[in-house]
Amino acid sequence: MKDNKNNDPGFFQRVKEFFVNSFNYPDEEAENEFDSENIELLPSSRKAYKHRKVWFPVLKSIGWAALIIAIALFLSISILQGITDIFGFEKESEAFEITLTGNENLSDILKILNERDIVTQPAAFQLYSTVKHWKKSSFEAGTYTIKSNMSYDEIISLFKMGMEKDDIVTVTIPEGLSVYEIAVLLEENGVCSAEKFISALETSEFGYEFVDLIPQSELRFRKFEGYLFPDTYEFYIGENPVSVAKKFLRNFNTRVTSAYYDRFKELDLSLDEVITLASIIQKEAGKLEQMYRVSSVFHNRLESKNYPHLQSDTTINYINNYIKPFLASDNQSMYDAYNTEVCKGLPIGPISNPGLDAIKAALYPANTNYYYFVSDVNGEYYYAKTLSQHEANISMVKKINAAAASKSDN
Protein backbone atom coordinates (compact mmCIF):
# COMPACT_ATOMS: atom_id res chain seq x y z
CA MET A 1 0.00 0.00 0.00
CA LYS A 2 1.35 3.40 -1.01
CA ASP A 3 1.85 6.17 1.48
CA ASN A 4 -0.69 8.95 0.78
CA LYS A 5 1.70 11.52 2.25
CA ASN A 6 4.11 10.97 -0.67
CA ASN A 7 1.34 11.81 -3.14
CA ASP A 8 0.56 15.14 -1.43
CA PRO A 9 2.76 17.85 -2.96
CA GLY A 10 2.44 19.93 0.24
CA PHE A 11 1.07 23.36 0.93
CA PHE A 12 4.05 25.37 -0.34
CA GLN A 13 4.26 23.27 -3.52
CA ARG A 14 0.58 23.94 -4.23
CA VAL A 15 1.11 27.66 -3.71
CA LYS A 16 4.06 27.58 -6.10
CA GLU A 17 2.03 25.78 -8.77
CA PHE A 18 -0.79 28.31 -8.31
CA PHE A 19 1.48 31.27 -9.05
CA VAL A 20 3.30 29.48 -11.92
CA ASN A 21 0.03 28.54 -13.58
CA SER A 22 -1.34 32.04 -13.09
CA PHE A 23 1.50 33.49 -15.14
CA ASN A 24 1.61 30.81 -17.92
CA TYR A 25 0.13 31.47 -21.38
CA PRO A 26 -2.64 29.11 -22.48
CA ASP A 27 -1.22 26.09 -24.29
CA GLU A 28 -1.84 25.20 -27.92
CA GLU A 29 -4.55 22.70 -27.05
CA ALA A 30 -6.50 25.34 -25.17
CA GLU A 31 -6.24 27.68 -28.18
CA ASN A 32 -7.50 24.95 -30.49
CA GLU A 33 -10.43 24.30 -28.16
CA PHE A 34 -11.29 27.93 -28.35
CA ASP A 35 -11.08 27.96 -32.17
CA SER A 36 -13.40 24.98 -32.38
CA GLU A 37 -16.25 27.17 -31.22
CA ASN A 38 -16.42 28.67 -34.74
CA ILE A 39 -16.11 32.18 -33.40
CA GLU A 40 -14.41 34.56 -35.78
CA LEU A 41 -12.44 37.38 -34.24
CA LEU A 42 -10.96 40.36 -35.98
CA PRO A 43 -7.18 40.61 -35.72
CA SER A 44 -7.44 43.61 -33.35
CA SER A 45 -9.99 41.76 -31.17
CA ARG A 46 -7.81 38.65 -31.09
CA LYS A 47 -4.83 40.76 -30.02
CA ALA A 48 -6.83 42.45 -27.26
CA TYR A 49 -8.16 39.10 -26.10
CA LYS A 50 -4.66 37.71 -25.84
CA HIS A 51 -3.60 40.74 -23.78
CA ARG A 52 -6.51 40.16 -21.47
CA LYS A 53 -5.60 36.52 -21.14
CA VAL A 54 -2.07 37.53 -20.20
CA TRP A 55 -2.88 40.32 -17.69
CA PHE A 56 -5.91 38.89 -15.93
CA PRO A 57 -3.94 36.15 -14.13
CA VAL A 58 -1.29 38.71 -13.22
CA LEU A 59 -3.84 41.07 -11.69
CA LYS A 60 -5.53 38.16 -9.99
CA SER A 61 -2.23 37.12 -8.44
CA ILE A 62 -1.47 40.65 -7.31
CA GLY A 63 -4.92 40.84 -5.71
CA TRP A 64 -4.36 37.60 -3.82
CA ALA A 65 -0.92 38.76 -2.72
CA ALA A 66 -2.34 42.11 -1.51
CA LEU A 67 -5.07 40.27 0.40
CA ILE A 68 -2.55 37.99 2.06
CA ILE A 69 -0.36 40.97 3.02
CA ALA A 70 -3.39 42.85 4.41
CA ILE A 71 -4.41 39.86 6.49
CA ALA A 72 -0.85 39.47 7.75
CA LEU A 73 -0.69 43.15 8.70
CA PHE A 74 -4.05 42.97 10.45
CA LEU A 75 -3.00 39.93 12.43
CA SER A 76 0.34 41.54 13.30
CA ILE A 77 -1.31 44.73 14.54
CA SER A 78 -3.88 42.76 16.52
CA ILE A 79 -1.16 40.65 18.11
CA LEU A 80 0.89 43.73 18.97
CA GLN A 81 -2.16 45.45 20.46
CA GLY A 82 -2.95 42.35 22.44
CA ILE A 83 0.60 42.10 23.78
CA THR A 84 0.58 45.81 24.65
CA ASP A 85 -2.70 45.39 26.51
CA ILE A 86 -1.68 42.17 28.28
CA PHE A 87 1.54 43.66 29.68
CA GLY A 88 0.37 47.27 30.03
CA PHE A 89 3.10 48.62 27.74
CA GLU A 90 3.05 52.26 26.55
CA LYS A 91 0.14 53.25 28.82
CA GLU A 92 0.08 56.26 31.10
CA SER A 93 0.13 55.45 34.81
CA GLU A 94 -3.28 56.76 35.86
CA ALA A 95 -5.37 55.22 38.63
CA PHE A 96 -9.11 54.61 38.50
CA GLU A 97 -11.44 53.74 41.32
CA ILE A 98 -13.92 50.90 40.77
CA THR A 99 -16.61 50.13 43.33
CA LEU A 100 -18.15 46.64 43.31
CA THR A 101 -21.36 45.60 45.01
CA GLY A 102 -20.44 41.92 45.11
CA ASN A 103 -22.98 40.91 42.46
CA GLU A 104 -20.69 41.40 39.46
CA ASN A 105 -19.28 38.56 37.37
CA LEU A 106 -16.23 38.48 35.09
CA SER A 107 -18.19 39.91 32.14
CA ASP A 108 -19.35 42.84 34.27
CA ILE A 109 -15.80 43.55 35.44
CA LEU A 110 -14.48 43.32 31.90
CA LYS A 111 -17.09 45.79 30.69
CA ILE A 112 -16.06 48.28 33.38
CA LEU A 113 -12.36 47.84 32.59
CA ASN A 114 -13.02 48.29 28.89
CA GLU A 115 -15.05 51.47 29.44
CA ARG A 116 -12.13 52.93 31.40
CA ASP A 117 -9.64 51.87 28.67
CA ILE A 118 -7.78 49.76 31.22
CA VAL A 119 -8.45 46.69 29.07
CA THR A 120 -8.68 47.61 25.40
CA GLN A 121 -8.74 44.03 24.07
CA PRO A 122 -11.66 42.28 25.85
CA ALA A 123 -11.30 39.06 23.82
CA ALA A 124 -7.63 38.82 24.76
CA PHE A 125 -8.47 39.32 28.43
CA GLN A 126 -11.15 36.61 28.29
CA LEU A 127 -8.69 34.20 26.69
CA TYR A 128 -5.93 35.13 29.14
CA SER A 129 -8.27 34.63 32.10
CA THR A 130 -9.16 31.17 30.80
CA VAL A 131 -5.50 30.21 30.32
CA LYS A 132 -4.79 31.39 33.87
CA HIS A 133 -7.76 29.35 35.14
CA TRP A 134 -9.37 32.50 36.53
CA LYS A 135 -13.11 32.10 36.10
CA LYS A 136 -14.58 33.82 39.14
CA SER A 137 -18.34 34.15 38.91
CA SER A 138 -18.50 36.79 41.64
CA PHE A 139 -16.21 39.29 43.35
CA GLU A 140 -15.84 40.69 46.84
CA ALA A 141 -17.72 43.93 47.40
CA GLY A 142 -15.50 46.95 47.93
CA THR A 143 -13.61 49.74 46.26
CA TYR A 144 -10.66 48.81 44.05
CA THR A 145 -8.19 51.27 42.58
CA ILE A 146 -6.64 50.09 39.32
CA LYS A 147 -3.82 51.68 37.37
CA SER A 148 -4.25 52.04 33.63
CA ASN A 149 -0.81 50.53 32.95
CA MET A 150 -1.40 47.36 34.93
CA SER A 151 -0.74 44.06 33.21
CA TYR A 152 -3.45 41.40 33.05
CA ASP A 153 -1.61 39.45 35.76
CA GLU A 154 -1.63 42.49 38.05
CA ILE A 155 -5.32 43.11 37.45
CA ILE A 156 -6.19 39.49 38.19
CA SER A 157 -4.00 39.52 41.31
CA LEU A 158 -5.66 42.70 42.51
CA PHE A 159 -9.12 41.16 42.40
CA LYS A 160 -7.82 37.94 43.93
CA MET A 161 -5.86 39.39 46.85
CA GLY A 162 -6.80 43.07 47.15
CA MET A 163 -4.69 46.19 46.87
CA GLU A 164 -1.04 46.32 47.84
CA LYS A 165 -0.62 48.50 50.93
CA ASP A 166 2.65 49.88 49.57
CA ASP A 167 0.69 51.65 46.84
CA ILE A 168 -1.70 53.32 49.27
CA VAL A 169 -1.08 56.59 51.11
CA THR A 170 -3.07 57.88 54.07
CA VAL A 171 -3.78 61.61 54.03
CA THR A 172 -5.50 63.59 56.78
CA ILE A 173 -7.38 66.68 55.59
CA PRO A 174 -7.81 69.15 58.48
CA GLU A 175 -10.99 71.19 58.85
CA GLY A 176 -10.99 74.66 57.34
CA LEU A 177 -8.63 74.18 54.38
CA SER A 178 -9.48 75.70 51.03
CA VAL A 179 -9.78 73.65 47.85
CA TYR A 180 -6.36 74.90 46.79
CA GLU A 181 -4.72 73.88 50.08
CA ILE A 182 -6.27 70.42 49.83
CA ALA A 183 -5.03 70.07 46.25
CA VAL A 184 -1.49 70.98 47.30
CA LEU A 185 -1.62 68.49 50.17
CA LEU A 186 -2.70 65.74 47.78
CA GLU A 187 0.14 66.53 45.41
CA GLU A 188 2.69 66.57 48.23
CA ASN A 189 1.58 63.06 49.19
CA GLY A 190 1.87 61.73 45.64
CA VAL A 191 -1.87 61.24 45.17
CA CYS A 192 -2.39 63.39 42.09
CA SER A 193 -1.47 66.73 40.53
CA ALA A 194 -2.96 69.74 42.33
CA GLU A 195 -3.81 71.38 39.03
CA LYS A 196 -5.52 68.27 37.63
CA PHE A 197 -7.46 67.78 40.85
CA ILE A 198 -8.87 71.31 40.73
CA SER A 199 -9.63 70.90 37.03
CA ALA A 200 -11.47 67.63 37.72
CA LEU A 201 -13.64 69.37 40.32
CA GLU A 202 -14.59 72.11 37.88
CA THR A 203 -15.24 69.98 34.79
CA SER A 204 -16.45 66.54 35.92
CA GLU A 205 -19.91 65.18 36.67
CA PHE A 206 -20.29 63.33 39.98
CA GLY A 207 -23.94 62.31 40.15
CA TYR A 208 -24.75 63.22 43.75
CA GLU A 209 -28.09 64.90 44.40
CA PHE A 210 -26.62 67.58 46.64
CA VAL A 211 -24.51 68.84 43.72
CA ASP A 212 -27.69 70.09 42.07
CA LEU A 213 -28.36 72.21 45.17
CA ILE A 214 -25.14 74.20 44.74
CA PRO A 215 -25.99 77.53 43.06
CA GLN A 216 -24.43 78.31 39.72
CA SER A 217 -22.97 81.80 39.50
CA GLU A 218 -20.23 83.53 37.53
CA LEU A 219 -19.24 85.25 40.77
CA ARG A 220 -18.54 81.96 42.52
CA PHE A 221 -14.84 81.15 42.39
CA ARG A 222 -14.70 77.43 43.27
CA LYS A 223 -17.80 75.35 42.64
CA PHE A 224 -17.03 72.71 45.29
CA GLU A 225 -15.43 74.95 47.89
CA GLY A 226 -17.02 73.87 51.16
CA TYR A 227 -17.94 70.36 49.99
CA LEU A 228 -14.60 68.51 50.23
CA PHE A 229 -15.29 66.82 53.52
CA PRO A 230 -12.30 66.99 55.90
CA ASP A 231 -11.34 63.54 57.14
CA THR A 232 -8.60 60.90 56.99
CA TYR A 233 -8.53 59.18 53.60
CA GLU A 234 -6.69 56.37 51.90
CA PHE A 235 -5.66 57.19 48.37
CA TYR A 236 -3.88 55.22 45.70
CA ILE A 237 -0.54 56.74 44.69
CA GLY A 238 -1.08 58.32 41.26
CA GLU A 239 -4.85 58.01 41.59
CA ASN A 240 -7.13 59.49 38.95
CA PRO A 241 -8.13 63.04 40.07
CA VAL A 242 -11.82 62.37 39.37
CA SER A 243 -11.66 59.30 41.60
CA VAL A 244 -10.01 61.36 44.34
CA ALA A 245 -12.68 64.05 44.11
CA LYS A 246 -15.42 61.41 44.31
CA LYS A 247 -14.05 60.17 47.64
CA PHE A 248 -14.43 63.64 49.16
CA LEU A 249 -17.90 64.19 47.75
CA ARG A 250 -19.08 60.68 48.62
CA ASN A 251 -18.00 61.28 52.20
CA PHE A 252 -19.86 64.61 52.30
CA ASN A 253 -22.95 62.93 50.88
CA THR A 254 -22.75 60.21 53.55
CA ARG A 255 -21.96 62.41 56.54
CA VAL A 256 -24.48 65.18 55.89
CA THR A 257 -27.58 63.08 56.50
CA SER A 258 -31.28 63.75 56.00
CA ALA A 259 -31.51 64.98 59.61
CA TYR A 260 -29.32 67.91 58.64
CA TYR A 261 -31.55 68.72 55.67
CA ASP A 262 -34.56 68.72 57.97
CA ARG A 263 -32.81 71.29 60.12
CA PHE A 264 -32.03 73.39 57.03
CA LYS A 265 -35.77 73.66 56.42
CA GLU A 266 -36.48 74.59 60.02
CA LEU A 267 -34.04 77.50 59.75
CA ASP A 268 -35.26 78.39 56.25
CA LEU A 269 -31.70 78.07 54.96
CA SER A 270 -30.42 76.24 51.89
CA LEU A 271 -27.66 73.66 51.93
CA ASP A 272 -25.22 76.13 50.41
CA GLU A 273 -26.12 78.87 52.89
CA VAL A 274 -25.48 76.52 55.83
CA ILE A 275 -22.15 75.31 54.41
CA THR A 276 -21.14 78.90 53.67
CA LEU A 277 -21.93 79.98 57.24
CA ALA A 278 -20.17 76.89 58.62
CA SER A 279 -17.07 77.69 56.54
CA ILE A 280 -16.85 81.14 58.16
CA ILE A 281 -17.43 79.72 61.65
CA GLN A 282 -14.68 77.15 60.98
CA LYS A 283 -12.19 79.91 60.17
CA GLU A 284 -13.28 82.29 62.94
CA ALA A 285 -13.52 79.83 65.84
CA GLY A 286 -10.58 77.55 66.37
CA LYS A 287 -12.10 75.83 69.39
CA LEU A 288 -15.28 73.78 69.51
CA GLU A 289 -16.61 75.56 72.59
CA GLN A 290 -16.43 78.91 70.77
CA MET A 291 -18.13 77.78 67.58
CA TYR A 292 -21.68 77.94 68.93
CA ARG A 293 -21.24 81.48 70.31
CA VAL A 294 -19.56 82.70 67.12
CA SER A 295 -22.46 81.14 65.24
CA SER A 296 -24.91 83.03 67.43
CA VAL A 297 -23.28 86.34 66.49
CA PHE A 298 -23.70 85.65 62.78
CA HIS A 299 -27.25 84.37 63.18
CA ASN A 300 -28.18 87.46 65.21
CA ARG A 301 -26.80 89.69 62.46
CA LEU A 302 -28.56 87.76 59.70
CA GLU A 303 -31.85 88.17 61.51
CA SER A 304 -31.37 91.89 62.30
CA LYS A 305 -32.05 94.82 59.97
CA ASN A 306 -29.53 96.90 61.91
CA TYR A 307 -26.55 94.69 60.99
CA PRO A 308 -26.69 94.00 57.25
CA HIS A 309 -23.01 92.94 57.05
CA LEU A 310 -21.39 89.98 58.78
CA GLN A 311 -18.03 91.81 58.78
CA SER A 312 -15.85 88.70 58.98
CA ASP A 313 -12.18 89.30 58.24
CA THR A 314 -11.83 85.68 57.15
CA THR A 315 -13.73 86.43 53.92
CA ILE A 316 -11.24 89.17 53.06
CA ASN A 317 -8.37 86.78 53.75
CA TYR A 318 -9.97 84.27 51.36
CA ILE A 319 -10.18 86.88 48.61
CA ASN A 320 -6.55 87.92 49.03
CA ASN A 321 -5.07 84.43 49.43
CA TYR A 322 -7.25 82.11 47.35
CA ILE A 323 -8.97 84.18 44.67
CA LYS A 324 -6.77 87.07 43.57
CA PRO A 325 -3.58 85.01 43.01
CA PHE A 326 -5.44 82.71 40.60
CA LEU A 327 -7.18 85.28 38.41
CA ALA A 328 -5.54 86.66 35.28
CA SER A 329 -7.23 90.01 35.86
CA ASP A 330 -9.07 91.73 38.69
CA ASN A 331 -12.73 90.90 39.19
CA GLN A 332 -14.10 93.43 41.64
CA SER A 333 -17.62 92.07 41.37
CA MET A 334 -16.37 88.68 42.55
CA TYR A 335 -14.35 90.23 45.35
CA ASP A 336 -17.39 92.18 46.56
CA ALA A 337 -19.57 89.05 46.40
CA TYR A 338 -17.24 87.35 48.91
CA ASN A 339 -16.35 90.39 51.05
CA THR A 340 -18.70 90.47 54.06
CA GLU A 341 -17.73 94.09 54.69
CA VAL A 342 -19.42 94.88 51.37
CA CYS A 343 -22.06 92.24 50.58
CA LYS A 344 -25.24 91.97 52.60
CA GLY A 345 -25.74 88.78 54.55
CA LEU A 346 -23.80 85.68 53.56
CA PRO A 347 -21.12 85.76 50.86
CA ILE A 348 -21.67 84.16 47.44
CA GLY A 349 -20.20 80.83 48.60
CA PRO A 350 -18.09 79.01 51.23
CA ILE A 351 -14.56 80.18 52.00
CA SER A 352 -13.26 76.86 53.41
CA ASN A 353 -14.21 73.24 53.79
CA PRO A 354 -15.81 72.89 57.23
CA GLY A 355 -16.11 69.80 59.40
CA LEU A 356 -19.19 68.44 61.11
CA ASP A 357 -18.61 70.49 64.28
CA ALA A 358 -18.78 73.76 62.36
CA ILE A 359 -21.82 72.55 60.40
CA LYS A 360 -23.59 71.62 63.63
CA ALA A 361 -22.69 75.01 65.12
CA ALA A 362 -24.19 76.72 62.07
CA LEU A 363 -27.40 74.73 62.60
CA TYR A 364 -27.62 75.05 66.36
CA PRO A 365 -26.23 78.44 67.48
CA ALA A 366 -26.05 79.37 71.15
CA ASN A 367 -28.86 81.56 72.43
CA THR A 368 -27.20 84.97 72.93
CA ASN A 369 -27.79 88.67 72.24
CA TYR A 370 -24.25 89.23 70.93
CA TYR A 371 -23.51 91.07 67.68
CA TYR A 372 -19.73 91.39 68.02
CA PHE A 373 -16.74 89.30 69.01
CA VAL A 374 -12.97 89.60 68.99
CA SER A 375 -10.21 87.18 70.00
CA ASP A 376 -6.67 87.60 71.33
CA VAL A 377 -3.46 85.78 70.47
CA ASN A 378 -4.08 83.31 73.29
CA GLY A 379 -7.32 82.10 71.69
CA GLU A 380 -9.64 83.82 74.16
CA TYR A 381 -12.89 85.29 72.80
CA TYR A 382 -14.67 88.44 73.95
CA TYR A 383 -18.29 89.04 73.01
CA ALA A 384 -20.34 92.22 73.01
CA LYS A 385 -23.91 93.37 72.44
CA THR A 386 -23.10 96.99 71.53
CA LEU A 387 -20.45 98.72 69.47
CA SER A 388 -19.08 100.58 72.48
CA GLN A 389 -18.62 97.31 74.38
CA HIS A 390 -16.94 95.83 71.34
CA GLU A 391 -14.53 98.76 71.03
CA ALA A 392 -13.63 98.36 74.70
CA ASN A 393 -12.92 94.67 74.06
CA ILE A 394 -10.73 95.55 71.08
CA SER A 395 -8.71 97.96 73.20
CA MET A 396 -8.21 95.28 75.83
CA VAL A 397 -7.20 92.68 73.24
CA LYS A 398 -4.59 95.03 71.78
CA LYS A 399 -2.96 95.36 75.23
CA ILE A 400 -3.01 91.59 75.73
CA ASN A 401 -1.47 91.00 72.32
CA ALA A 402 1.18 93.67 72.85
CA ALA A 403 2.13 92.16 76.20
CA ALA A 404 2.38 88.71 74.64
CA ALA A 405 4.57 90.04 71.84
CA SER A 406 6.83 91.83 74.31
CA LYS A 407 7.15 88.69 76.39
CA SER A 408 8.09 86.58 73.38
CA ASP A 409 10.77 89.12 72.36
CA ASN A 410 12.39 88.84 75.75
Image: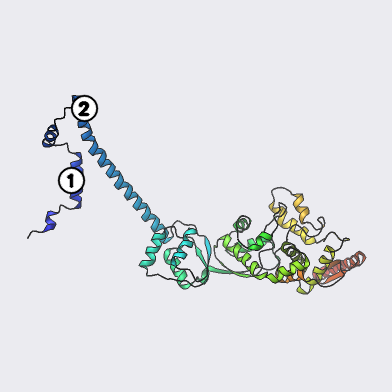
Task: Give the residue at x 20% y 52%.
Answer: 11
Amino acid type indicated by mark 1: Glu
Quadrant for residue 189, please give it: bottom right
- The front one of 26 and 185 is 26
Question: Where does the image place residue 219, in percent across and percent down from the top left?
Answer: 73, 52
Q: Is residue 410 visible?
A: no
* Left or right of 337 in this view: 241: left
Task: Give the residue at x 86% y 63%.
Answer: 304
- Which residue of the protein is positioned furthest toward the right in this rendering? 388
Quadrant for residue 152, please give it: bottom left
Q: Which mark is residue 17?
A: 1
Q: Is the N terminus in the top left, top right, bottom left or bottom right quadrant?
A: bottom left
Q: Is residue 237 above or below residue 46?
A: below
- The front one of 322 and 127 is 127
Question: Where does the image place residue 340, in percent across and percent down from the top left?
Answer: 80, 58
- The front one of 109 and 193 is 109
Q: Is residue 213 visible?
A: yes
Amino acid type indicated by mark 2: Ser
Q: Which mark is residue 370?
A: none
**Element type where label 2 sits in the image:** helix
Q: Which mark is residue 45?
A: 2
Quadrant for residue 232, please give it: bottom right
**Element type where label 1 sits in the image:** helix
